[in-house]
Structure formats: structure tokens, C-alpha cells
Amino acid sequence: MNHLKVERDGRVVTVRLHRPHVLNALSGELLTELLGVLRPLDADPETGCFVVTGSEKVFAAGADIKEMAGKSAVDMMAEDYFAPWEKFADLRTPKIAAVNGPALGGGCELAMMCDLVVAGESAVFGQPEIRLGVIPGIGGTQRLTRLIGRAKALDLILTGRTMDAREAGSCGLVSRVVPDDRVLPEALDAAATIAAYGRPAVRAARECVDMALETGLRDGIRFERRVFHALFATADQREGMTAFLEKRPPRFDGS
Ligand code: CO8
């Protein structure tokens, strides 16, 4: 692999973006590597959580501008440029973004495709594509608006300004803001906690929360109730509730 560093610690897999000369700009090759690593792991029952991070200085400065600068509209449409990023969003294993420094353009969009975002005090978020004569292209106009609301999303997207970690935390883009040197430990800690729970319940919880962004309240509540009912077919439900009644820690096995 040229653009990633991958480590596994038990049920947690950490992927570090590694294109330091271009501030981890997200190229097509990087995406191919990312999906090549994560998709088989997503299907592996021994995988409990992914952590996606950059360096201590930068998460990712966006899509690779050099790679796309010379393309025509026909190229973009023919390649359906950026479409495979949805395969990253669609991974069913929870993903935690651990962000230090800038997460701009595609970098901000990558963070938004994750389930939790742990940001250091140096983190900076924004969708500056307007400065390049384009708009966000990896879901930014859609996810950002759903996450932080229209007024704030348009403030960022139309002016191209950035916001710091504190502002990102207060408007709901970020799950936790911690000192810079605590970002990765905090993300790994959360990942280990999630990875220790039963896979069926973890995946069900993610799907239900994402459904809240995609459907009306009535349908969403019905969906949640049916998924809740279905979890009573799992051994993890029996184990979790029995362990509670027997006053002992549960041993989930994902079945
Ligand atoms: N792509 C390619 N190279 C980059 C990128 C990038 N996104 N960002 C930085 N680099 C390169 C620079 O060109 C520079 O290379 P070199 O050393 O060869 O000159 C190197 O990384 C270091 O960058 P800087 O010298 O600029 O570093 P600074 O610390 O001065 O600034 C910034 C850091 C503020 C992050 C600055 O680099 C910057 O503004 N980067 C671009 C941010 C940006 O605009 N991101 C959005 C990209 S577009 C996108 O993500 C989605 C596009 C949607 C298109 C829709 C089509 C369907």
C-alpha cells in the first residue's frame, strides 16, 4: 500500500491516511486502497470498529486537486467521479474519524461519512470548494446540511470559511473535542468499547440512526421498532439481558 498505514489491535482496525507531501489529499488511488482494505474487513466477524485518521498535523486537505484539475465534464460523468466514496460510507462496521489539523473539502466529507468524529483542539473543518470554482462533491452539501442545518451549512459552503473544533463541536459536526494528543487514544478507546458489543445490535443501531436522516419520523419509528423486535432473534439479546439479571458482565459473540 502506498497511501495508507493499517494496524489491527484485536477487533479494532486503524487506517492512517499517508500522503504527507500533499496533506493527505484524497486521490482515486488512495480510495481504491482504502476500499481494498476495509471491504473484506467489513465482512469479517472479527472486526468490531474502524478508526480513520491522518497525521498529527493534518487529517486531509480535500480531494486531490491536481488529479482532477485537467478533467472535462465528460470525463467526470464517464468516471462518475467520487461515486465509489459511497462504498466507504456504506461500510456497516462503525467508523470513527480521529481528526487533528485541517479536515477540508473531501477531508470534511470523509469525517462526516464516519459515525463518530473525535477532534483535537487544532482541528479545522470546512468546505472551501467555492474558492476553486466548484462545490462539495462527496456528499458535503447533503451531509453537512443534515448534520448542522441549512444556515450554518450555507455559511461554510458559500463563504468557504473554516470553523475550529470548538465551533464544530457546538454545532454537532463533531462528537468529542479533546486536546490534540488525546485524539487517537480517545478514538481507540471509543472503538474498543463499541467493538466489544454484539455486532447485530451495533449494526442495527447505526442503521436506525442513519434512517433518521433519510426518512420521516413515523416511518423511522416503525423501522426502529421492527429492528428492535428482530434483535430478539439474537443470542446477544438473551446473553445481555440474562447477564444483567445475573449481575455479571455479558459475553457477546455476535450471534
Ligand atoms: N490536493 C492536492 N494537493 C494539495 C491539496 C489538495 N487538496 N491540498 C494541499 N495540497 C498540496 C499543496 O499543493 C502543496 O504542494 P507543494 O508543496 O507541491 O506546493 C502541499 O500540499 C502543501 O500545501 P500548502 O503549501 O498549501 O500548505 P499550507 O500549510 O500553506 O496550507 C491548506 C494548508 C490550508 C490545507 C492548503 O493546502 C489548502 O487550502 N488546500 C486545499 C484545500 C481545499 O481546497 N480542499 C478542497 C479540495 S476539492 C474537494 O475536496 C472536493 C471537490 C468537489 C468537486 C466536485 C466534482 C464532482
Image (cartoon, helix red, strand yellow):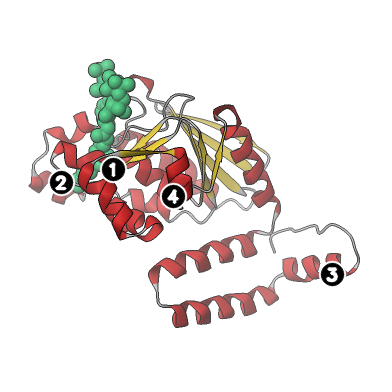
Picture quarter containing residue 110? top left
The verdict on label 1 being within 8 Å of ligand 1 is yes
The N terminus, quarter of image = top left
The residues tagged by marks 4 and 2 sit, at their Cα atoms, a distance apart of 29 Å
Q: Position of residue 85 (x, y in %)?
A: 34, 48
Q: Decide which of tag 3 and tag 4 comes sooner along the chain.
A: 4
Q: Position of residue 146 (x, y in %)?
A: 37, 60
Of marks 1 and 4, which one's residue comes earlier in the chain? Answer: 1
Q: CA distance from mark 3 to mark 2?
A: 54 Å
Q: Residues within 10 Å of mark 4 (few under 14, many from 20)?
A: many
Residue highlighted by disc 1: 127
**Secondary structure state at the residue bearing disc 3:** helix
Q: Is residue 63 left or right of residue 199?
A: left
Q: Which residue is mark 4?
A: 173
Labels 4 and 2: the sequence-earlier one: 2
Please state, as top left, top right, bottom left or bottom right, where the C terminus lies in the image. Answer: bottom right
The residue that disc 2 covers is: 76
